[in-house]
Amino acid sequence: MSWSAVSSAVTTIGGLITKEAMSLWGVEDQVDRLQNELKWMQSFLKDADSRQGESERIRLWVSEIRELAYDAEDVVEDFALRIGSRRRGGFSNTIKRSAFILDEGWELCKTKWKIQKIMATITNLTRQLQMYGVKELREGQETSISSQTPRELRRSYPHIIEDNIIGLKDEIDTLVSVLLNDQTPNHKLVSICGMGGLGKTTLAKKVYHHDRVRARFEHMAWVYVSQQCQRKKVWEDILASVTSSNERVSQLSDAHLAAKLFKLLKEKRCLVILDDIWSIEAWDSLKPAFPLTDDSKSKILLTSRNKEVASYADRRCYLLELECLKEEDSWKLFQKTVFPDSSGDHTDRRIDAKMEELGKDMVKRCAGLPLAIVVLGGILTTKCSLNEWQMVLDNVKSYLNRGRGLRIEDVLALSYDDLTSYLRPCFLYLSHFPEDYEIHADRLIQLWVAEGIVSSKQGEVGGETIEDVAEGYLIELAERCMIQVRERDAATSKIKTFQMHDLMRDLCLSKAKQENFILIVDQSNACSSSTIQKVRRVSTHDSVQIQRINSPSLRSLSFFNEFHPKEVFGKYVPWTMLNYLENHFKLLRVLNCEEIINIGGGCKLPNDIGNLIHLRFLSLRGLVVLNSKLPSSLGNLRCLRTLDLRVVWSVQVPNVISKMEQLVHLYLPRECRVETKLNLGTLRNLQTLVNFNTQSCYLEDLINMKNIRVLEVHGPFEIEDFNREELDKNLPIIHGKYLHSLSIWSAERIDPMHLAHLLSSCVSICKLSLNAEIRKLPEQRYLSPNLAYIQLRRCKLEEDPMPTLEKLPNLRVLEVENKAFIGKEMLCSAQGFPQLYSLSFWGLYSLEELKVDDEAMPCVRRLQIESYQKLKLQLPERLKILL
């Protein structure tokens, strides 16, 4: 975590040195030396972060370094933004600046002193880390922080078979069938993946000992790999299991050993189980001994918490991803653990109604994780009274970490320990969100970037944006089974929303508390009168008197008060709270107000909210704004990357957004009132632009947004002097090189030729939503072949759109709804819609006949057609059963 904080500071300071040289005049030498000190210190921090568990002193030093990195970033940026802004403007600004000369001199001296103090402390701490044997690691090097004890307790032995198997029969049958070639294709590599505690090893053992499997394979080998993969030891153990030779394999070289094992596995029918393999690097070191070609007679089955290992090892791999137990199976496993049928000591015990109620409440707390249920059941086998069960229920989390031998948190913590230095802060950031909260991937990525959790330096390779890098990190967390994907984008299959397993979230909260990463205000501390000091991030899950927070260094403040009764929040007036923010938290980078409940008519933004000049992320989504007007001081927020103004009802927006040239994501109000049209042509970094209304914004400004990826346009658009004969002679409306999602909504009719011209430049678009009358669909040549999702509403198409749409080679989702088509017949011909997966028709009240050829839509799995009396359907039988 400290490594990430220092990385963010180095990146921010480096950017200021490059782009704001004038702003740093007078302190440039000190800032340059500070950046070098931070870089030097950063080289030690990966190892120091990994060794915090060894020494309380190291942990305290690392914590202090993290705070120093934050301070360094704040000091330099604050000087550049406050003093540097007065220096812009040249001679014409001299008279205005004269009043600030003395103040500027004092700020200069104060900033130099602060930087020197930080550098002295950094140097001292780094040397002390060196004295404690902390190693300097170069860029790209990582170090493992997993402890030996939990790893050894997790070691699997094939002869120990767990009897507590519930809900895995189908999975066992599937894996046996795959291994015995009962299914095609012939998979040489089979993988069981899932988060820690789901039963991957238990399932693998059941397959390993299955009668049909043992009858098929001549030799069997079980090897426990773990995070500390020892290649030669793994190969030796396998060879010892699959051969009866007395040859001393320990004396063989690695190359000889790999060749011998490769030949044996290729020629003989062997099953090798690689239990608990963690990384691609571990597989790369082992794979020279494993033949995966079609002529090999052996099979490899691996278990892993990382799905990426299997797909990387063999693209034809059969991947079985385990899921949490359903409620019914969880209860069965609990009963089987607490009251084992084979145990004479417990056969006479019976569970009464009250005990069952307590037991089911406890099982819910385990959230379907088999290991947690078994640990809890083991604890309750010795507890017979209702009072004892009630005590366990009241302290479930504590009891889960008292299990014999191994605590639940230790098992899950192995996944955290295996995270790279750049992924740990990404995981810890998830502690912001309440239990069972469905997190939107796009919003999380914006928050990561705003706080420097993912730095711009990481996004400078190969044209990747910083958001691309952050999305890669999120995918890694999903591949490592540390988050649970709930919804994927229909067009791109990218993660749209996800949640955390309750016990994984408990681990996240525990680690975040250890790191002093964040303060969560919830029911346990919301009513406390104590002052909150020296904290960088606050996330409120319950009502809080904001005056309790006395931390000038606060960087992030998020509200999730929708999870609690409105009458409670009504005690605290939102606009009073916002005024307090502006006066006391001047270093805020993130202000996320979108979950605040509006009480007493709404809130009024302070006129001086523009003083929060460090803000990178500001969301007012869902707020009711009093006076229906936003303050013009918003224009001072020139560091903003994300601005979400989707407030409730109509609001007047001042024409100051053009000053925010760093904006990447802009969400305008749905009902946006302006005195003059908004100038947005300066926003060349925009990737997301939502609620762009042609009545309040200039259509021609879109052409300057060369990096736009998501665009939502409202209102009519007319192109002057439009050449209808030669569309390519017209000036382009937008740069569509990177645009992948376009939504158009208009209450007025849109000229289909204007629409065709717009779409002709959208070469990369994969999502298209049209909610406007166009009468005629543009020809196929104007539609990108990359289109995977199309939604048509209120289009009033007079001609059947299917002959055009069915030729799109990658279309997966099609929604034709609400008078999108006003003709009487639709025909989907043979070979049409080759990739279509989901089709929806509703609100097409003029449609009388829909005919789909037997060979059309071979991949459709989801079909929704609103039926009404006059509609005649001619569908293949395979489609009829989907209705």
Image (cartoon, grey):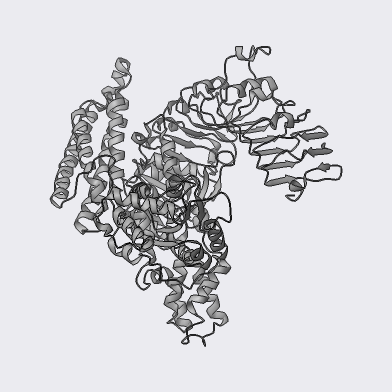
Q: Position of residue 123 (x, y in %)?
A: 15, 42
**Which residue, as the protein is rendered here, is positioned at the far right?**
870
The answer to whether residue 555 is above or below residue 151 is: above
Specify the quadrant of the image occupied by residue 376: bottom left
- Picture coordinates of residue 824, whole percent (x, y): 83, 34
Asked if 62 appears above or below 327 in the picture, the reply is above
Q: Is residue 77 visible?
A: no
* Residue 846 appears left or right of 301: right
Q: Residue at image x 24%, y 49%?
A: 47
Residue 816: image location, x then y, percent: 71, 37
State the residue in front, 124 or 797. 797
Q: Nearer the viewer, residue 563 or 240?
A: 240
The quarter of the displayed image where residue 664 is located: top left
Relative to 363, residue 593 above or below: above
Q: Position of residue 176 (x, y in %)?
A: 53, 61
Q: Nearer the viewer, residue 459 or 291?
A: 291
Q: Residue at x 44, y 58 (%)?
A: 270
Identify which residue is drawn at 44% across, 80% down: 381
Is 244 placed left or right of 51 in the picture?
A: right
Q: How many marks?
A: 0
Tell me if I can see residue 662 in this picture: yes
Front residue (pair 250, 830):
250
